[in-house]
Image (cartoon, rainbow, N blue to C red):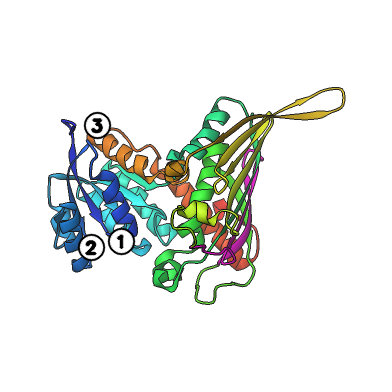
Amino acid sequence: MMNENAIEVAILGCGQMGQHILEHLRDCPWVRGITVFDRNADRMESLKQGFAVSTAATLDEVLRNPEIKLVFITASNNAHKELAVAALEAGKAVMCEKPMATTLADATAMVEAAERTNGFLQVGFELRYSRLYTTVKDWIEGDLLGRVLNTQCTYISSAWGKHSSWRVASKTSGGMFGEKLSHYVDLVRWWVGDEVEEVYATCAPNVIPYYEVHDNYHCSYRFKNGAVSQLTFMMGPAATFKGDPLQNAVSQQSGDGHMLRYMICGEKGAAETDVFPRTIKRWEFGDNDWGQTSAWVQNETWDPQYDFAYFHNTHDQARDIVRRVAEGKPPSINPRDALETTRLCFAAELSATEKRPVRLDELK
């Protein structure tokens, strides 16, 4: 049943991510109507027929429509700043997919536009909605882990194909950290609850020859409160197994070289999240006459049908954002908070390029 405060929304850029958002919102009680705008006219016509949405011939048509209260920006990364600032200045609420922009100056301009217009701007860090990671946040806030001191993430994935050329071109992606790894540094900032002071990233030569951006990193970052985090990322060596058609993508890739695993260590206990085995675990620390002890106290898993709710919950994020705008509430992630994650991403890229540690206060 449609809510009495339901609003009209628009989706700017209707590639893969835009179509996911369209799926998420098609039966949302907070949405009264959806308009799509994309430079590909054939794509828009296909969506109009398949989803019964309205289409706009120009961006200005969207921005001048007083009924449209919220726009979802799912265009390529290099278009984010221009679209976000124009929408905010037109009085629209904005949800922008990560990365915020391909330069720190553009990302800062987006936040300043939101503040200048007193507008709504939320960046798509959907891991803060994902059950695998919100569980860890709940454990931290419940003081089950104590103060978080050290986190380690290992992420190995297969390569993007040449059809995803905008993702691997430096001008349109803004770098691998912004395009792919921003999720995984934002998540740790959220858990630790403090700002990063210094980052040091190193890279080997690329495995993937057609990438303009780095395809591997070892990255360490130190927080102001003394906590440290490590991110190891490799793209390329994991296979893309397309065997059993009855298994979903995660099941197919499990044991096939893919990995996305966190270890989170606090003063009182530790946690592990592991996407491909579908597990989340917690340990409690103690001591006795022998010395340090550790008890495995929680072990949870989930059914494959809930995979994306656990580790990429764009569904609940999209619907929560619509609800917030309809109810006149602020974004769940403050734009300045999102900007700090963006600053960390650019600092890591600078560190990898200049082969030195970079302090976050170097980037203004």
The one nearer the camera, 311 or 328, is 311
Q: Are marks 3 and 2 in contact (CB under 8 Å)?
A: no
Query: In the picture shown, does residue 206 fall above or below 33?
Result: below
Label 1 sits on residue: 15
**Could you tell me residue 16's position as x and y percent?**
33, 59
Give the label on residue 327, or none.
Answer: 3
Residue at 38%, 46% (x, y): give it.
314
User: Which region shows up in magenta?
Assistant: 215-242
Residue at 36%, 64% (x, y): give it.
78
Question: Going by the picture, which residue comes out furthest to the top?
Answer: 289
The question of residue 239 being in magenta is answered with yes
Under tag 1, what secondary structure?
loop
Residue 16 in view in this figure? yes
Disc 2 residue type (three-letter): Asp
Disc 3 residue type (three-letter): Glu
Disc 1 residue type (three-letter): Gly
